[in-house]
Amino acid sequence: MAGVLLGDGFVFLLGRVYGERALKLPVLRTVLHPERFEKVQEKFKKYGKWVVFFGRFMPGLRMPIFFTAGTSGQISFFRFVLTDGFAALISVPIWVYLGYYFAHNFDELMSYVRRGQTIILVLVALALLGFGIFFYWKQKKESPS
């Protein structure tokens, strides 16, 4: 928990102290490009601390959200740590338990992964089929008879 809060607090303070100048750093530029930064800024202005809370549950978006929270000036460091800490009280034990459980049940984990892959592939195939039918229907409708 301490490591989670230290890491998140560091990202927040990086945004607070260096602001948008930090976006010029090569490490940050690859993760937080200007389009993503603007998108997160809009969401943060609209929903405030709720973005911080739900950001804890969004791998890949967590760092841009916490950095933007720091640059926005709309949330104090104390409120950020409280909000993030409350969300971490939910997420960290879940991930620790899942890691512990599946470390001892690797075959079951692989079964879930294979099932999940199958479901994803079926959904992608259905989506492609749906898009294909839609574009075929649209082309047929637009072409002169």
Image (spheres, helix red, strand yellow):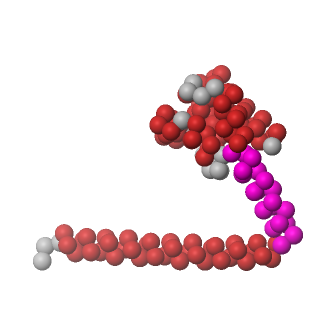
Residue at x-position 73% and y-position 32%: 10
Q: Which sits in the foreground, 129 or 25?
A: 129
Residue 116 position in % (x across, y down): 64, 73
Does residue 24 appear to the left or right of 137 in the view shown?
A: right
Does residue 115 appear to the left or right of 39 in the view shown?
A: right
Q: Which sits in the foreground, 102 or 129?
A: 102
Q: Which sits in the foreground, 10 or 54?
A: 54
Residue at x-position 32% and y-position 72%: 134
Query: Is residue 24 shown to the viewer in this render?
Result: no
Residue 66 position in % (x across, y down): 63, 37
Segment colored magenta? 87-105
Residue that extends furthest to the left in the rendered view of this protein: 145
Q: Is residue 16 above or below residue 107?
A: above
**Magenta-drawn stretch, dominant element (helix, strand or loop):** helix
Residue at x-position 62% and y-position 34%: 67
131 in the magenta segment: no
Q: Quadrant of residue 128?
A: bottom left
Which quadrant is home to the C terminus? bottom left
99 in the magenta segment: yes
Residue at x-position 76% and y-position 38%: 5
Q: Is residue 71 above or below residue 30?
A: above
Q: Is residue 102 above or below residue 4?
A: below
Residue 100 position in % (x across, y down): 84, 62
Q: Quadrant of residue 118?
A: bottom right
